[in-house]
Amino acid sequence: MIRKFIFSLTALLSTTYCTLWGQTYIVEKLDSTINTKEFDEVTPIITHDGGTVYFTRVGSSDFIKTIWIDGKDVSNDLKYNEYLHNLREIYSEISGKPVSGNPEKSDFNQDIWYAESREKPFDHLVHPPSPLNNALPNSICSLTPDGDTYVVVNQFSKDGGMNKGFSLVKQLPDGTWSDPEPMQIDDYNISSAAISLTMSNDANVLIMSLPKTQGSQDNDLFISFKIDENHWSAPKNMGAQVNSSFKELTPYLSPDGKELYFASNRPPSVGGLDLFFISRLDDGWDNWTKPRRFVEPINTTGDESQPYFNMTTGHLYFSSKRDGTHDIYRVKIAPDVEQELTIKGRIINTSTGQPLDGRVMYGDADAAFYEKYVETIEGYFLIRVKQGKPIKMIAYKPGYINHEVILNYDKRVFFGKPQDVTLYLDSVAIGGTISLNPIYFKRSTPIILQESYSELDYLVEVMRQFTEISITVEGHTDSNGTPETLMKLSEDRAAEVRKYLIRNKIHPSRIAVIGYGATKPLSKETDEESRRLNRRVEFRITKIAY
């Protein structure tokens, strides 16, 4: 949820417009779901689909209080005053000087939060527990290419303690988080807390804001290049085309790698930090345009920093102190591009109803093959797909029968909403079932309706693929009729399905039939829908010729 918040030159008004490079812009302040009056909200990071914003809240008493010492969380073993004393000592050690007062209000108390878009933009707030958050400073500073792994500031030991640097954390398909994995950057020996990082969309480039020299109070932008997995070269100063004698902070590289946004107090800033951007002039990383400063009301006499541009929605997000505390704002500076949607899914074994590990393959519905795949973790998977274009998806595991699904998410309806998908695998085992969509018949007859031919054609393909299996076709009816009539109708319908399979070259010896009439209902018949569920044909594996 978003509240519009714009400035004039003289007063705070409900709406203010500015013209930047010939276009009118509106600055919006994210609403109280995210921003608070008493705390700082900083470092906005937006998922590719534009539907989730990660941010850092500073100095809130509602923080994850976990303190790891020798592999044990001691926070629950301490009385409140003892806990505050320990926390004050930890923050003093991090700072290098004594931290007085209530440590909960310290700038070192930083937790990661995120807000998902469900009914409205950013209307569902989540405060992740350990291991993503703890009582130490926690902050996400960049996405990575795979969409569910993030770069966080600092390195954390599983036994306790914190080192300077950066780490990778992964959100697992069930919503939990992995332990932070330290990133290896050659010759990185920075002791300053004022560091930040942005990663290119292919993970080959890191651009960091680091002290100009060891012990310096001012930062420059540095660049590192990927050497191998989780290993990057020593930071190299980006030079006078990018840096100045002032501070260059909080860089963000656009997904296409063409624009670099950052904050600086260089002239012609109007007070404190302002937002600037530069553009690459060629395919290398040495030639850039002169820095261009965003004008008012994007920049103000307060501090503006931590820019983050989302190409899906065309919004530039940033942090500003214009309203007394640091809050998160956004301004639309470009048109929308094709949106992506996050799918959270799982594979289910139809025989047991339990999650099953396997491979999920997916791609454009009209493609001749599946273009991408992902392996599940404990049966769960997380992928991003384009909205407004049909995709096909299937679960695969040797020895199981799979079922393709076609999905089409209209971006006008599903904007920013993570979708849940369940894929089913049928076990090739005696007693197992082959799950199909319902087979429809002409009312009170065994005549198969044409709309069910595609399902039976799929069954034909399964029988051709798994030549070792034999099945029984089980017919069922609702209770509307005499037992004798219903038993005969269920047998006739099962027999009609058998004939269809035989006509499609499935050997008759592999197909038995049985009718159960109304003796095995799936639901109590209270309306037409429940009666329809009971009118069905099921397919059970009865023999496997090894």
Image (spheres, grey):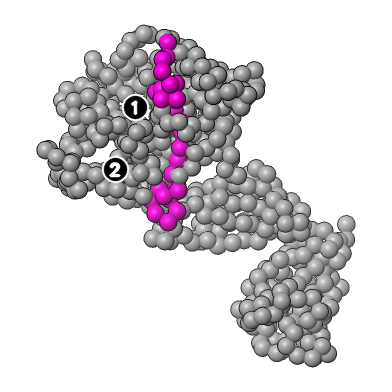
Looking at the image, residue 314 sits to the left or right of residue 403; the answer is left
Identify the residue under disc 1.
250
Whether residue 169 is visible: no
In percent of width and height, residue 339 lies at 40, 52
In percent of width and height, residue 186 lies at 48, 15
* Magenta-drawn segment: 98-124
Q: Tell me the distance, in whole angstroms, between the alpha carbons under discs 1 and 2.
A: 20 Å
Residue 509 within the magenta-colored segment of the rendering: no
Quadrant where the C terminus lies? bottom right
Looking at the image, is 2 positioned above or below residue 495? above
The residue that appears at 41% across and 9% down in the rendered structure is: 97
Tell me the tag on residue 446.
none
The residue that appears at 30% across and 31% down in the rendered structure is: 325
The residue that appears at 52% across and 31% down in the rendered structure is: 64
Q: Residue furthest left?
A: 10
Q: Amino acid at mark 2?
A: Lys
The quarter of the picture where residue 530 lies is bottom right
Whether residue 55 is visible: yes
Label 2 near label 1: C-beta < 8 Å? no
The quarter of the picture where residue 244 lies is top left
The residue that appears at 63% across and 47% down in the rendered structure is: 380
